[in-house]
Amino acid sequence: MMDSVLWYWPLHTPGGSMNFITLINWTVMILSNYFNACLLVLASSLWGGNCKILRIACTSNIVKSAKHTRHHGHIVAESVTAPLGCIHAAFIFVMTMYTQLYNRLSFGWNTVKIDMSAARRDPLPIIPFGLAAFAATLFALGLALGTTIAIGMLVFIQMKIILRNKTSIESWIEEKAKDRIQYYQLDEVFVFPYDTGSRWKNFKQVFTWSGVPKGDGLDWPIREGCHQDSLTIEQLKQKADKRVRSVQYKVIEDYSGTCCPLNRGIQTFFRRPCTQQPRIRLQKGEFILATRGLRYWLYGDKILDDSIKEGVSRIRGWFPRNCVEKCPCDAETDQAPEGEKKHR
């Protein structure tokens, strides 16, 4: 704002006044949407609003992914207005440096001189545009461009989620549903229930005139032919399939549960999984049900004894593959779910 008022576009001109009002407007919109989103998140966490309401299937303990939250619209609005305001500010910074340096340039036959102490503008500005002002303007320009790029990428991701009406977790569930159907050669098609099939309809579910997305946090508009529990039922099937595909391993060497084991080999150390999921401590003789894995690491649940089960629900995480050996497969493990025949 100082660059605009003092050195680029003075307030006594109509264009300067409009430019200054626009800058103030960007600031008000960015801060209002930001604080509205923060207050709604705080209210939702304190009083149980729709922000984190989850639909739980009581008999299965399978959690349905939360859809659009009440503050989603404010977050996207803030993400859109921030790059626009930064682009406007970057334009002001560039034009300020251009006009100020142009007024201080003098050309000779073989030389170009810049006199930062002189200004050829009438009337002279209250605060002269010196070397410190030039450095501050250049630094602010870098911040404006960096914010535009960073927040612009966030806007792209948010709009992609809104137009598909599908979060990243739900996209992962959909991919696993297609893999399950293809793996067992089933005669069924999984249709994601919350994608209406129209990007415009998906967009209108989030951006409404009231500012509150459609839905009450439990029930959401769904696609024709689906119901509110379609996603939960698919997750139940995937959980059952996960238990069927799990492989039992026996621990042959102790593992302390450290994130970077130095005594398990060079490949195990450098090719560990890049995830925040925990590592589990292993003792020789224990049994593990592995559900997925990498070349040098496995992920699974520890099979607990009756003496340990009290007060402990599950112990699961990553562990080195060279600490365990595969057990002979049970007949129960090899069997596919009832009514499903496995083909490869």
Image: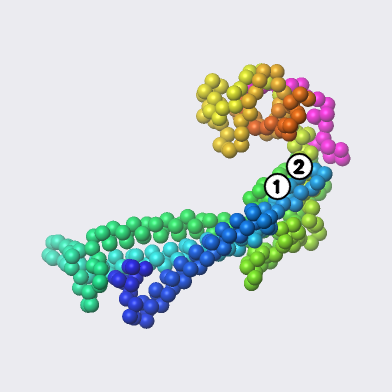
Residue type beneath disc 1: Ile
In the displayed structure, does residue 120 sit left or right of residue 255? left
- In the image, residue 161 sits, relative to residue 306, either above or below, namely below
Q: Which mark is residue 134?
A: none
Kind of element beneath mark 1:
helix
Q: Is residue 64 visible?
A: yes
286 on left or right of 27: right
Q: Residue at x 42, y 70 (%)?
A: 23
Q: Residue furthest right?
A: 339
Query: Residue 89's x, y, as percent?
Result: 40, 66
> Is label 2 in contact with label 1 (beta carbons under 8 Å)?
yes
Classify mark 2: helix, strand or loop.
Answer: helix
The residue positioned 79% from the left and 39% from the top of the image is 240
Q: Does residue 109 show up magenta in the picture?
A: no
The residue under label 2 is which amino acid type?
Answer: Gln
What's the residue at 76%, 54% (across, down)? 191
Residue 239: image quadrant is top right
Residue 154 is situated, as x and y percent measured from the top left of the image, at 53, 56
Q: Quadrant of the C terminus?
A: top right
Q: Residues within 10 Å of mark 1 (few under 14, many from 20)?
A: some
Colouring method of the image: rainbow
Quadrant of the image occupied by residue 33:
bottom right
What's the magenta region? Answer: 322-344
Q: How many marks are shown on the rendered structure?
A: 2
Could you give the CA–CA distance between mark 2 and mark 1, rounded to whole angstroms? 9 Å
Q: Which residue is mark 1?
A: 173
Q: Main secondary structure of the magenta part?
A: loop
Q: Can residue 294 be seen from the camera position used here?
A: no
Residue that appears at 43% across and 65% down: 87
**Residue labelled with disc 2:** 238
Q: Earlier in the sequence, mark 2 or mark 1?
A: 1
Count neighbours of disc 2 (C-alpha within 10 A) and say few if under 14, some if 14 to 19, many if 20 or more. some
